[in-house]
Image (cartoon, helix red, strand yellow):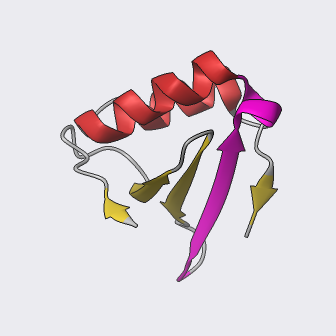
């Protein structure tokens, strides 16, 4: 898993993993002392959205906002 750069310092995202047709995003849970990961795939969230998430993850900025506004509950798996 790659560390998320979090350029604006306001994201709860700490890491991500990119696959051919998915992205896994790791969030630090404010109310707990742990982490939650969400897998977004072409099937669950759409190809365009997942590709946008990959771009934002690689740039280190805007991923949290995009997830909250566009794909929030369209994850395939949560752990």
44 relative to 69, above or below: below
Q: Quadrant of the N terminus?
A: bottom left
Point 48% across, 31% down: residue? 53
Residue 39 in the image: above or below residue 8: below
In front of the other: 25 or 51:
51
Residue 73 placement, left or right of 26 = right
Q: Nearer the viewer, residue 1 or 26?
A: 1
Taking the image as shown, residue 77 lies to the left or right of residue 57, namely: right
**Magenta region, residue range:** 33-46
Q: In the image, residue 79 lies at what x, y percent? A: 73, 70
Magenta includes 67? no
Q: Residue at x 53, y 83 (%)?
A: 33
The x and y percentages for residue 54 are: 44, 35
**Residue 59, x across and y down, in percent:** 24, 34
| Residue drawn where x is 68% and y is 43% of the image | 40
- Looking at the image, which residue sits at the far front? 20
Above or below: residue 76 compared with residue 31:
above
Instruction: Quadrant for residue 21, please give it.
Output: top right
């Amino acid at each position: 898993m790659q560390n998320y750069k979090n350029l604006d310092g306001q994201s709860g995202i700490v890491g991500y993993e990119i696959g051919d047709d998915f992205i896994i995003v790791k969030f630090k849970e404010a109310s707990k002392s742990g982490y939650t990961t969400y897998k977004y795939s072409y099937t669950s969230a759409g190809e365009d959205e997942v590709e946008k998430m990959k771009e934002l993850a690689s740039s280190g900025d805007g991923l949290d906002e995009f997830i909250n506004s566009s794909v929030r509950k369209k994850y395939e798996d949560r752990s």
